[in-house]
């Protein structure tokens, strides 16, 4: 059951003036996304928000400066997703650049420790004899783990970007733009972005204290990692995040990324000189994430920390193999979920406002991907559950939402109405995680669906494909395709341009059993198109209306372009 999507065009917006090198098509695209000037559309590092207004920054940099001066042991504690891995690598590399000599890192194992700085992980960290723990991409909700660390006499600095619970942890310092009362203008920094900001402030503190002969180390060398983590975590790409990602992409395109990222780009068979945010999201990040989903993210972090190209390539090859396995596991789980859902829901009219799915044989590291795939197909909030470990009576759930339904707030409402039903939870508007006893699943599903039904309107449950309108005949060109590709970074909150129009279908064929290759005709011009996952068992009609992205066809080279179809319906 896939709901029929409605195709809607964005309203045109007047903007400008623009430099002559920005094509009118790109000017129109920028204006429709609220960027009325080149500085808003293509922000540079010079436009970066200063760190000054972040709460807790003085305390955080004081802890780090004192630890460096006293040669204390700093342990950076990462997380098992791409944002957490890149944030860990940024923290370790950045602290060493700033003079720390005793820096180690650790990361929880998803199966063994669960999420974040848990008491179980603290117990294992004792062998490292840390003086200061620095959490990255987590910590704001790790009250028990931080209390356990403090009980051992360790200092704790939390750097995070997630929403806090009712009570903040007992850390020595917390830097999180989403903690209560924090005035930092951008609330959408990724975890890696928060850690990068802490390092910027630390460098300034050390420089003011005379620690460097000049301005200090060049922290822009870390922006390749910041870009990858920011794109991978699907945080909105506001102007501040776009400045960070753009700078990181420039480093990667110039071959200046760390050895691990260069190796991952190579095994993913991407051209580094043309690397885009989309390449990060669909090729680089999944290979890093695969380690944390099926194995241990320590391997991914090792890839990002090594400076040996041969070792980086060896690890990247391993990550690539794990990712192949992850894709197979994911596809099997998605197929099983769709079969289970189809047994109880026949069409969109009978579908519940939100969906909960569980299978005792599912892998807890892949349920987030299952929830994401089904959310896209059903246009409903989806939570997929798996046993925390084989045979466990504890479930781990991963939730994905649709625009207009804040999934973390919905979980908070369920928790408030039914105390004790959820073990723990946390997350964002569009993604969240939770745990609960297996015997509580049915009661939770009913409570969550009641909450969703009360908050989701028919309009919110109607899938919508937004278009930037039609392309002119002259805009079906390699020049415009490259301008669109390079005009980003595009992503969450600053969506990649897509257009719509009616076309005659000259030829079509099925590729790899699931995709549809099309030759289209428009105003006498023949255009190649591909609709990934578009084969539904029926051939397309002679005339179609499609929504599509215009991309350079690097496979054919030269002036070749192709349309990447994202929506298709009879004309």
Image: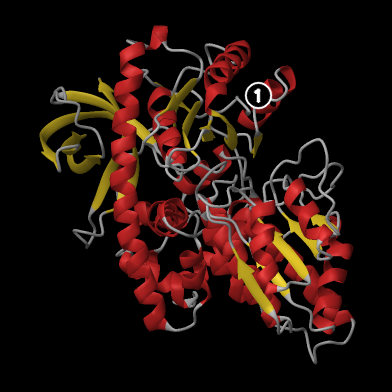
Instruction: Tell me which corner region of the image, top left, top right, bottom left or bottom right, holds residue 535.
Output: top left
From where the camera sits, is residue 205 visible?
yes
Number of on-image labels: 1
Label 1 crowd (10 A; few <14 / some 14-19 / many >=20) = some
Which residue is drawn at the image coordinates 44% and 51% (left, top)?
293
As drawn, which residue projects farthest toward the bottom? 213
Residue 450: x and y in percent read: 59, 12
Query: Residue 548 at x, y = what percent?
Result: 33, 37
Q: State the image coordinates of residue 116 (x, y, percent, origin top left).
A: 64, 51
On screen, residue 558 above or below 335: below
Quadrant in which the C terminus appears: top left
Point out the residue furthest to the top here.
349
**What residue do we see at 34% from left, 58% from top?**
322
- Residue 245, visible in the rendered structure: no
Q: Describe the colour scheme in one phrase.
A: secondary structure
Left or right of 318? Residue 514 is left
- Looking at the image, residue 399 sits to the left or right of residue 219; the answer is left
> What residue lies at 76% left-to-right and 41% top-to-bottom?
164
Q: In which quarter of the image is the N terminus?
A: top left
Identify which residue, 372 or 19, lies in the foreground: 372
**Residue situated in front as seen by the camera: 236 or 136:** 136
Q: Horizontally, is 83 left or right of 125 in the view?
A: left
Pinpoint residue 526: horizontal percent, then vertical percent.
16, 41
At x 77%, y 55%, the residue is 148
Q: Nearer the viewer, residue 201 or 81?
A: 81
Which residue in the structure is indicated by mark 1?
Answer: 421
Q: The residue tagged with tag 1: helix, strand or loop?
A: loop
């Amino acid at each position: 059951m896939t709901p029929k999507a409605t195709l809607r065009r964005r309203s045109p917006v007047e903007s400008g003036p623009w430099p002559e090198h920005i094509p009118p098509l790109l000017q129109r695209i920028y204006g429709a996304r609220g960027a009325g000037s080149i500085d808003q559309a293509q922000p540079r590092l010079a436009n970066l928000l200063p760190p000054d207004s972040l709460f807790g920054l003085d305390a955080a940099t004081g802890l780090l400066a004192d630890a460096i001066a006293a040669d204390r042991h700093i342990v950076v504690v990462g997380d098992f997703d791409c944002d957490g891995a890149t944030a860990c690598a940024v923290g370790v590399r950045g602290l060493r650049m700033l003079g720390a000599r005793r820096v180690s890192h650790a990361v929880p194992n998803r199966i063994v420790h669960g999420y974040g700085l848990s008491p179980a992980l603290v117990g294992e960290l004792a062998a490292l004899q840390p003086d200061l723990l620095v959490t990255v991409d987590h910590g704001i909700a790790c009250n028990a783990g931080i209390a356990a660390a403090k009980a051992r006499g360790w200092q704790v600095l939390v750097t995070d970007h997630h929403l806090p619970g009712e009570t903040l942890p007992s850390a020595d310092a917390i830097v999180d733009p989403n903690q209560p009362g924090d005035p930092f203008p951008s609330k959408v920094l990724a975890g890696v972005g928060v850690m990068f900001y802490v390092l910027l402030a630390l460098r300034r503190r050390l420089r003011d204290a005379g620690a460097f002969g000049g301005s200090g180390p060049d922290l822009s060398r870390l922006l390749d990692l910041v870009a990858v983590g920011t794109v991978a975590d699907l945080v909105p790409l506001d102007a501040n995040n776009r400045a960070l990602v753009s700078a990181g992409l420039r480093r990667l395109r110039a071959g200046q990324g760390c050895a691990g990222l260069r190796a991952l780009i190579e095994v993913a068979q991407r051209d580094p000189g043309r690397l885009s945010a989309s390449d990060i999201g669909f090729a680089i990040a999944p290979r890093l994430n695969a380690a944390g989903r099926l194995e241990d993210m320590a391997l991914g972090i090792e890839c990002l920390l090594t400076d040996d190209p041969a070792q980086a390539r060896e690890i990247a090859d391993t990550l690539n193999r794990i990712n192949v396995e992850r894709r197979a596991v994911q596809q099997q789980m998605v197929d099983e979920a769709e079969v289970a859902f189809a047994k109880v829901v026949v069409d969109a009219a009978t579908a519940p406002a939100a969906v909960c799915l569980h299978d005792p044989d599912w892998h807890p590291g892949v349920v987030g991907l299952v929830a994401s795939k089904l959310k896209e197909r059903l246009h409903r909030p989806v939570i997929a559950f798996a046993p925390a470990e084989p045979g466990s009576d504890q479930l781990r759930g991963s939730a994905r939402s649709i625009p207009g339904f804040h999934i973390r707030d919905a979980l908070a409402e369920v928790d408030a109405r039914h105390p004790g039903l959820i073990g723990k939870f946390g997350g964002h508007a569009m993604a969240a995680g939770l745990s609960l006893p297996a015997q509580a699943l049915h009661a939770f599903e009913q409570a969550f669906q009641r909450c969703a039904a009360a908050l989701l309107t028919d309009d919110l449950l109607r899938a919508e494909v937004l278009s930037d309108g039609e392309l002119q005949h002259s805009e079906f060109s390699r020049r415009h395709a490259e301008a669109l590709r390079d005009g980003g970074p595009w992503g969450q909150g600053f969506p990649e341009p897509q257009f719509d129009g009616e076309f005659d279908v000259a030829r079509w064929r099925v590729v790899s059993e699931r995709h549809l290759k099309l030759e289209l005709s428009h105003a006498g011009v023949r255009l190649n198109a591909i609709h990934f996952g578009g084969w539904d068992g029926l051939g397309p009609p002679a005339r179609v209306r499609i929504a599509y992205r215009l991309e350079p066809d690097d496979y054919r080279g030269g002036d070749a372009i192709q349309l990447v179809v994202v929506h298709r319906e009879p004309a």
